[in-house]
Every structure is written in structure tokens, then in C-alpha cells.
Image: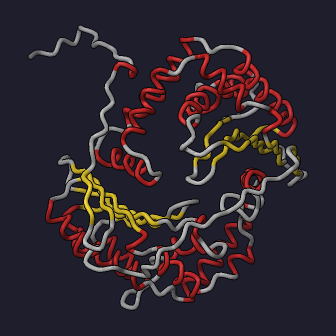
Amino acid sequence: MTLNRAQVPKIYSPQEFEYILKPASTDTLDNGIPFYSLTDSIEPVLQLELVFNAGLWFEQKKAIAQATAALLKSGTSRLNSFQINETFEQYGASVKVSSGPDWASITVSCLTRHLQQVLPVVYEMLTDTQFPQSEIDIYVQNSKQKLSVQLLKSEFIANRKIDEYLFGFDHPYGKYLFAEDYDAIQQQDLKQHVSQLYSSGNCTLFMAGMFSEEDKKLINQIFGSQAWNQQQKVPLPVYEVQPETEKKHRILHDEKSVQGSIRLARPFPQKTHPDFVPMIMLNTLFGGYFGSRLMSNIREEKGYTYGIHSMMLNQKYDGAFMISTEAGKDVCEAAVQEIYKEMNILKNELVDEEELNLVKNYLLGSILGGLDGSFHIIQRWKGLILNGFTQERYYNNIEIYKSITPVQLQLLAQKYFDESAFYELIVT
């Protein structure tokens, strides 16, 4: 068939597509670890992710979750940190350890043929990391230095304080670190965190890329042949949200500053709440993408800022809705009033169909991009599985994005865009 370059190809709206989430294979390793995988044959590479319930929500001492992730490659009984990193580099592998509010993860990216050389070292890290005191001292020194630099920035102060206002300082989502918290890190704290939480009984595996059944057997041989680390079930900690009673805050951080950091935020239900997915649509229209109303008004028309965004803070066990921007010191108060003005417009006026279709196409187009290749698709599955959802959640979300109406958005705005519910913070 000859391609006719004079003929304009047909343009399709993202709303016309059928969104099919390719199923992931579901297996269980011999020691009980759930193992989800998705294969393709494009390139001989793969990505394996080990996810643990080991984030801030589960740490028993401040700073330990992040320190554990940063120091997991610090050295075992057999290999020092240089040798561990040199091994990964020798095989062109990337091994990243990260810790967030809810989960910690180890992400291994490598050529499929090097799996046999890379994974035993990852297992050794999990089961035999010694956390040498010299490595801890370097981490503490670097972290304190980084903190001292960050504390000079108004946006850093604003991010710390708004979380505290929302959840309370003793809550995992509201606490933040001081220099003395780093000084208090002990080798035994790190070993205990790994032993209790980086265990086979607290792990879920996700893999995507090009691999064979033999590769899956190798993973089972390394990570599934026996239980590793402590197998006592760690109960889910329970925390009480203790929000700040005062809603409006102004912090003078630097008298010479010419810029202020603005944060407006309010509590919002968890992902399981029926309003969560429709709110994603309202959030996108309001301030969730470059063409949003906040960007059009406060950046394009008023010129108060280079960028402004609203977002859903969608941790697993609690949530919030936030607007975030940096603006000139002399226009911060005016910017706050413009934010409320845009909220009130959405409460009182229906969104026109043309604007709503644009936002629908943007969101659905983003989902289409997330269905391109096994690496993207397994991340979609990971988000569903870790939050306790099935694929029905995915298809329900698509249907909501396609069918939501201006009236539904107005009702959401009237419910959640109540000015008195927002914490209002400006740090200058």
C-alpha cells in the first residue's frame, strides 16, 4: 500500500479510544512474595522493583526510613560500598533505593542477560547490609549540610509548614527533620528497620521488559527460595491527625527576599472516596496542567508568577488538596485573592463544554501515553495493586473522565472550594 502524503490523516479524539489495560501475569514466589510481571520483546532490558511497606508511615524513629534507603548500598560483610556500586556499573545496571511517605522500593534496571550477576548483590544488600559507621557519618554530615542550604529557601519552609498544619507534627505526613534528628541516627536503628520491614513477608515484586520463564525461575531462586529477614508481621501503625487550629499564616523568613512562597491547602478524602477521581478532573481544569485557569489568570494575565499548580496529595492513608506557587513579595496577597476568585467562579458558573472537552482530552491523552510499553503499564498495575484496587478501578476512572458533566464539577467545587476550609500560608 502506497502512502499518500497529500492526504491529511484522520484526527481522533482521545475520548474515542478504547482503553485496554494489558493484564499482568500474577505469580507467587515459593516463600509467598506476590510477583506481578509484564513482558514485551522490543529490547533485551527489564526493570524489577521490590516494594516494601517501609516508608515514613512505618518508621519507629525519625529520619530512619530515608536514611535506610540512602545507605542500603553502604556495604555488606563481603563488599564495601565502592565494590557494590562498581559491580552494578560493570554490568550497566541501575539500582536505586528510595523511600516515600508509604513505601520504600528497590528498582533494578539492567540488560536481561546480566540479571544473574546483578540480583545476587541486591539480595546481599537486603539480607547483609552492615551500615558501616563511616558511611553513616558521611550521610549525616551531607544531610545536615543539605538541610542548612534548604532552610534558606522560602519554598522549603512553606512545604514543611503546610504539611504540619494539615496533619500535625507527630503525624508521618506532617513531620519534618532537624539537624539533631540526623545526629541521632544509630547503626542499630537502620539494621532494625531493614530486618523488620525489608523482609520477604513485607515485599511485593513488579517486573517489566524482556524476560523468559527461566528469568522468572532465577528470581524465585534468589528471592523466593526461603524467608529472609524478620518474618513477624508488623501491624499497621495508627496515627491521629492533629491539624493546626489557626488557618491563616504569614512567616517572615528573609527580610531581604523579593519573593514569597504561597501554599493553600485543605484536607481531602483518601483515594477510596467516590469524590477522589472526579476531583482529579476538577483539579486539572483548576490548576493541574499548563492550560489551567490558575495558569491563565495568575501567570498569563497578571504576571504574578512563572508557574502555579494545584495538586492532590494522594498518599495511601490520608490526603489533601493543595495550591502551590512562588510569586513576587509585593503581589503574594493579591495572588491569594485571585486563587479564591477562580474557586468562586467554578462554584458559581458552569464550565463550558469546549473547555471541559479540552481537559478530558488532556487527561485521557496522558493515560494513553501511560499505556505505551510494558514499563509504563506495570507502573499502572503497581499503583492499583499497592492501593488495594483491581482493574475495575482503572476502567471506572476512564468512564468518569469521559462522562463527567459541568454540573458535577460545579457541585464538587461547591463542596470542596470553601475558602474557610483552606490553610493559607505565605513565607517571605
Q: Nearer the viewer, residue 149 or 386?
A: 386
> Residue placed at 49% from the left, 78% from the top?
196
> Residue placed at 83% from the left, 48% from the top?
427
Quarter of the rendering containing residue 247: top right
Residue 156 seen:
no
> Residue placed at 68% from the left, 27% from the top?
294
**Residue occupying the far bottom of the picture:** 77
Question: x, y percentage for residue 56?
Answer: 60, 65
The answer to whether 140 appears left or right of 36 in the picture is: right
Question: x, y percentage for residue 108?
Answer: 35, 64
Classify 239 as above or below 307.
Answer: below
Question: x, y percentage for residue 371?
Answer: 33, 38
Q: If the image is split into quadrants, where does the N terminus sit?
A: top left
Quarter of the rendering containing residue 26: bottom left
Classify 149 as above or below 421.
Answer: below
Classify 7 as above or below 284.
Answer: above
The answer to whether 175 appears left or right of 206 in the picture is: right
The answer to whether 112 appears left or right of 233 in the picture is: left
Q: Nearer the viewer, residue 42 or 280?
A: 280
Question: x, y percentage for residue 52?
Answer: 45, 66
**Residue occupying the far top of the picture:** 7
Q: Nearer the viewer, residue 357 or 278?
A: 278
> Residue placed at 84% from the left, 33% from the top?
331
Classify 358 as above or below 225.
Answer: above
